[in-house]
Amino acid sequence: MHRFARPGRGAATKSTRESGQALLELALIAPVLILILAGLVQFALIFERQIGIDNAIREAARRGATLDTTDLTTAQANANWTLGQAQTLLGNSQNHETVRDTITVCYFTPPTNQQDPQGHFQVDVRVTDSYRHPLFLPIVDILLDQIDGVQDQSLKATSTTEFHVEQTGSNNIDTGAGARSVEGGAVTMAACT
């Protein structure tokens, strides 16, 4: 047979059928693969943003732990300052939306292990941020939106860091003082518990 001769009729039909079958399989599988890929992107964005929030909250608490807190008046001033630090650090985080978070800062004497070995009362600082991560993919939204108990097309994740305030002497501020920023920046007093 000549090298440029046309293949038989049966061979062309078989190739066309296989090509059509592969196209049909791709059409059935492609939407599922696209949803899986989009879900991975959604989770990656949530994790990336949450890592930035964790780092900012930890740094704000660390900075707040360097302030002497001798009484309730000082504790309130320190809580307001630390809240400002947390807001600034979170504002520097990539893609952070301040209207989606609630930040709470508390300076308090811990309920257990109140005294160090010398008998001095201790003070702790706790910084907490609850952030509502936006969910942009409808399938992921249906699966994750109910986890936090509120149906608002977002996933709420909370990050808390607590540090011991290193200072000299005995400073008992009991339940302490605090500051809170609620979704949008309004600063109010918060009772520490």
Image: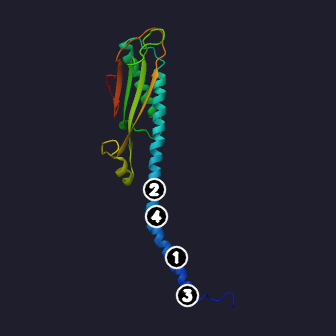
Q: Pointer 2: what residue?
A: 36
Q: Position of residue 98 (x, y in %)?
A: 38, 35
Q: Position of residue 101 (x, y in %)?
A: 37, 35
Label 4 neighbour load within 10 Å: few <14, some 14-19, many 20+: few
Q: Which mark is residue 10?
A: 3
Q: Which mark is residue 60?
A: none
Quick one: label 3 or label 4, which is nearer the N terminus? 3
Q: Which mark is residue 30?
A: 4
Q: CA distance from mark 1 to mark 4?
A: 16 Å
The reply to whether discs 2 and 1 touch (Cβ–Cβ < 8 Å) is no
Quick one: label 1 or label 3, which is nearer the N terminus? 3
Q: For the point 43% across and 38% down, which residue is it?
A: 96
Quick one: label 2 or label 3, which is nearer the N terminus? 3
Q: Pointer 1: what residue?
A: 19
Can residue 22 be seen here? yes
Q: Amino acid type of disc 2?
A: Ile
Q: Position of residue 147 (x, y in %)?
A: 35, 44
Q: CA distance from mark 4 to mark 2?
A: 10 Å
